Image: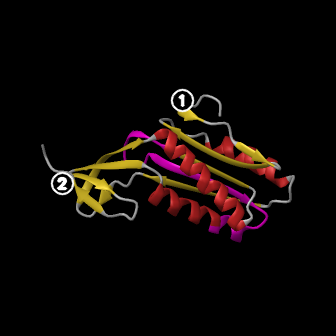
Amino acid sequence: MRGMRLLYYRQPLVVNEMVVEALITRSELNVNEYLEKLSRASSRDGCGALVMFMGFVKGLVGEGSVNELIYEAYENYALSKMREIGEEAVKKFGVRDVVVVHRVGNLRPGDPTIYIFVTAKSRGEAFKAAEYVLERVKHEVPISKLEVRSDGEFWVLGDGRRIRRPRT
């Protein structure tokens, strides 16, 4: 999209007008641009639902206030895996488009971390596909997450478990 500084970008896979797109970026996304692009294109194919999920950095976890979340990715494999998950969601749920955008770098509380867009003919499939994509991305894509908090630093795993980082 215009003005985005991407770490790595692969052209979207387009098959029979269906789009599966995976991006990793240090920048925030122009959400409205994606919403407009996807809704206009998919409506021509009879779609009437667009589900968007946006995750963001929590400001408080347990008793510790979060100062920042540091995301790092093994980019080539992460993008490949994100695209694979998107393609599987299209096949499994019969949705038209799946776009997954994950941010990396040092993010502060309230900063967006991940965006997932899914278009479909009906909302039921779109919601199911979006949840499926999110859970698979959290558990399978090699993106590490270090939570820097007032009570220490913690590696955050895909299932939400936190492992204290030893002080050096």
Residue type highlighted by circle 2:
Asp
Q: Secondary structure at mark 1?
A: loop
Q: Residue 83, image x and y in percent? A: 61, 49
Q: Residue 2, image x and y in percent? A: 65, 30
Q: Residue 104, image x and y in percent? A: 44, 40
The magenta span reads: 102-128
Q: Residue 32, image x and y in percent? A: 66, 44
Q: Residues within 10 Å of mark 2 (few under 14, many from 20)?
A: few
**Nearer the N terminus, badge 1 or badge 2?**
1
- Of residues 82 and 111, the one drawn nearer to the viewer in this rendering: 82
Residue 55 counted in the magenta span:
no
Name which residue lies at 79% across and 61% down: 48
Residue type highlighted by circle 1:
Arg
Name which residue lies at 66% across and 55% down: 87
Residue placed under numbered mark 2 in the picture: 151
Q: Secondary structure at mark 2?
A: loop
* Mark-to-mark CA distance, 1 and 2: 33 Å
- For this view, does 119 lie left or right of residue 76? right
Residue placed under numbered mark 1 in the picture: 5
Asked if the residues shown at circle 1 and circle 2 are in contact, with their CB atoms under 8 angstroms apart, the answer is no
Q: Quadrant of the C terminus?
A: top left
- For this view, does 65 lie left or right of residue 16? left
Q: Quadrant of the N terminus?
A: top right
Q: Residues within 10 Å of mark 1 (few under 14, many from 20)?
A: some
- Of residues 66 and 143, the one drawn nearer to the viewer in this rendering: 143
Extreme residue toward the left, this view: 168
